[in-house]
Amino acid sequence: MKLAAICLGRPEILQSKSYKTGINKIPVNAPTLVDRAGLVGDSVCNRKHHGGPDQAILLEGELTITWWSRHLGRELPSGTFGENRRIDALDGRDVCIGDRFVFAEVVLQATAPRIPCATFAARMGEHDFVRRYSAAGRPGIYCRALREGVLEPGEAVRFEPYEGDRVPVADLLPRAGERINPPDQSRLMALPIAERLRKRYSTV
């Protein structure tokens, strides 16, 4: 696999919205520094639901985007989904919590699924996109940076599967009315999930 794109966003206001968002990401053709907070130079405006060390990077697989492109009937250039990175030859459904993406300097670990929101729907210009995205079961993947460093577009990526309990990231997309039973709760809490998920599962 290779790093197909690195994308950064700047604060702006989407049509029909009154608040600033950094969801509009633009590909950059230059080395970019990754620290524990994410890509240096990228904007995260809503810190309550986005960003932080456990959700520092939003990653999409090129195979997942190709699927969405067919179903939406339009091209989806890099950054369209608000992702920081695209990896070619990757289908997000194959990624489990704890899996690692190893670059020359940087190491990322999958921690949570991307949860769709009204801002994402506005970005896509699809009023029911939150429902469609959730129903598709092909979420983007939030990652923490286990090792900081510089990334370059086109560099090789090595995929390292998590050696513990393998739970697909897509399985953690919330479903309406779903409740977690105690065995499943213990199983999920034992994984290297993002802190926002940990708080949610600890209160169910």
Image (cartoon, rainbow, N blue to C red):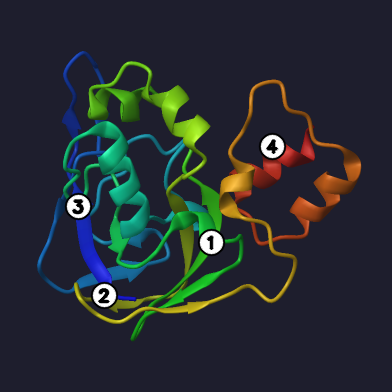
Q: In this rendering, which labeled residue sits more in front, label 2 or label 3?
A: 3
Report the Cα–Cα distance between label 1 and label 3. 20 Å
| Residue labelled with disc 1 | 95
Residue at the bottom extreme?
A: 104
For image coordinates 69% across by 46% down, the residue present is 198
Q: Is residue 141 left or right of residue 80?
A: right
Label 2 belongs to which residue? 151
Distance CA(mark 2)–CA(mark 1): 21 Å
Q: Quadrant of the N terminus?
A: bottom left
Residue mark closest to the camera, 4 vs 3: 3
Q: Earlier in the sequence, mark 4 or mark 3?
A: 3
- Give the CA separation, mark 2 to mark 4: 32 Å
Mark 2 or mark 1, which has the lower sequence index? 1
Q: Secondary structure at mark 3?
A: loop
Q: Secondary structure at mark 4?
A: helix
Q: Which residue in the structure is indicated by mark 4?
A: 200
Whole-percent x, y for residue 158 in the image:
42, 81
Residue 43 visible somewhere in the drawing: yes
Mark 3 highlights which residue? Answer: 78
Q: Callout 3: 10 Å neighbours few (<14), some, many (20+)?
A: many
